[in-house]
Amino acid sequence: MKGRIVMKKLPALILTLCLAAGLLSVFSLVSPAQSNSVLDDYVTDGLAAFYAASHHSADGKTWLDASGNGLDLDLASYDESNNYFDGEKGVFVNKSTKIFFDGAIATLISTGKFTTEMVIKDTDVTGSDFGTYLNCTNDAYSLFMRLNDPANVFVEFKCGTNQRPKVAVPDKNYFKDSTVTVTFDYSTGVNCLYVNGALLQSKTPTEPFTVTDFYLGHNDGTRSHDTEFACIRFYDRALTAAEVAENYAADNGGSLPIDTSGDTSEPPAAKQNRAEEQPYTASGIYVDPNNQSIPYPDTDGKELTDGVIPSTAVYSDPAWVGFSANSTDYKESGYAEIVVDLGEVSEITGVNIVLSNLGSAGIGAPKEFVYSYSEDGENWNELGYGAYDVEPAANLGAIINNYLNESAAARYVRARFKNSEGNGWMFIGEFQVFEDAETPVFPDDGSSEGQSPPTGDAGIALAVLVAITALAGAVIVKKRS
């Protein structure tokens, strides 16, 4: 098993090294960040590009890169009525348009080590399903508001096939008057989403991902928005929590109190996959009696929690396990089932199942997919129906996930599902159950501690205390009213 994991990760490692070398050659051709007033009070270590709305050509057709790396953003080909600088407000107005960055930004993101920051003033999400702020054509990176969930609005960061930070927020225009930061480093397990210097959620990435290009804004009616950008920044490394707070303070004139005395530059605690290498039972797996290798069965009873996400969508990849309506036990029960034993009662916050390429080669989507949890394996509590997150760039088809607003105590986690109609197949690559190693607390009005994230409304003060531990520094952030 270990040997297979190494073989799966080797191509990604080679690709990453090549991308890193390419990125180094790009930035070695230009001078490092210059000292100028635009960069005052901001973190400049690792700064790759810095777009301040006040820093542009006289004709407004070029958004100048203040970092000194020369990655100016050419605006000449875009409709000036929908994309322009407002000097009075100090913003770049973008209305339902994709604005593409220099190709070096895509190369940077593809190394798997980066920070992206955007400073937003006013914003109005006009998309019917999403509000997508930063994105790429192959959709491997996407920072967006999710509106198509009937129960909640979410802020979400998609990062290839890695686990996504995803947090319920009060409304679709949550990013108004906010600094939004994403830090990512697959080699150290950093994948953090911050708003106004406060950590909303962190995940543990396992691999880099490739983007074909990179742009801000969106012209699709399902993903569009009208937004005022005050600044956009890119770094070639993951900033620490203290550095994120420092930049947020600089966005507000440097007036926010920052205490970095205890910072050790360690990443914040991330979610852990409690299901990895844990035992489970499964029904509905189909094995052809004439050829037991087609489709690939669960050969060792460990495939669904071995921590290996299949590298291809081809069902012959042995990391996939085939479930079928032809299975005898499926016909008897009416559904397929997977039950993972976590070994002890744990506080879980999310469940994922990775599926193969839905809708192709006779492989279908499951129906009535429901997650449940139990402390004793007999009395079950329903988590609800999973929500599809389609991943066309990775050719994995989808991830069915369910994120909880509050943690739940569980030793056993169950997924029950009806397969596609007829003789349809469904292939599962991994069953993941997540818990917080340390759940951040976001005080609401200062009088009580709740689980709600801080609001983006400029009229409400924000106070976030990140606990001082041996592994994390203290950062006190207060939003200027």
Image (tube, rainbow, N blue to C red):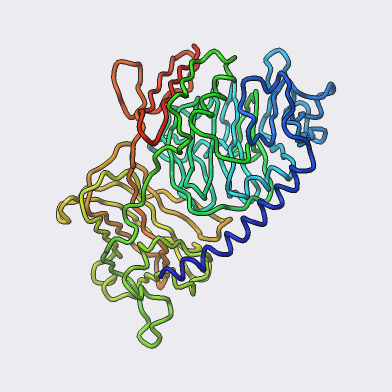
Which residue does the image show at 65% across and 26% down from the upper left?
Answer: 231
Q: Count every numbered label the image shows and give the total.
A: 0
x and y percent of residue 433 in the render? 33, 52
Between 124 and 307, which is closer to the camera in this rendering? 307
x and y percent of residue 387 in the render? 41, 48
Left or right of 76, for residue 239 = left
In the rendered image, the residue lying farthest to the right is 59
| Image quadrant in which you'd find residue 276 | bottom left
Q: Is residue 430 above or below residue 325?
A: above
Left or right of 300, for residue 105 = right
* Quadrant where the N terminus is found in the figure: bottom left
Left or right of 191, for residue 350 = left
x and y percent of residue 331 in the render? 28, 72
Which residue does the image show at 80% across and 29% down from the upper left?
Answer: 62
Q: Is residue 321 above or below residue 472?
A: below
Q: Is residue 153 above or below residue 246?
A: below
| Image quadrant in which you'd find residue 63 | top right
| Image quadrant in which you'd find residue 108 | top right
Please say whether residue 359 is visible from this viewpoint: no
Left or right of 270, for residue 407 = left
Between 413 and 287, which is closer to the camera in this rendering? 413
Which residue does the image show at 51% across and 36% down from the upper left?
Answer: 145
Please say whether residue 211 is visible from this viewpoint: yes
x and y percent of residue 247 in the render? 57, 25
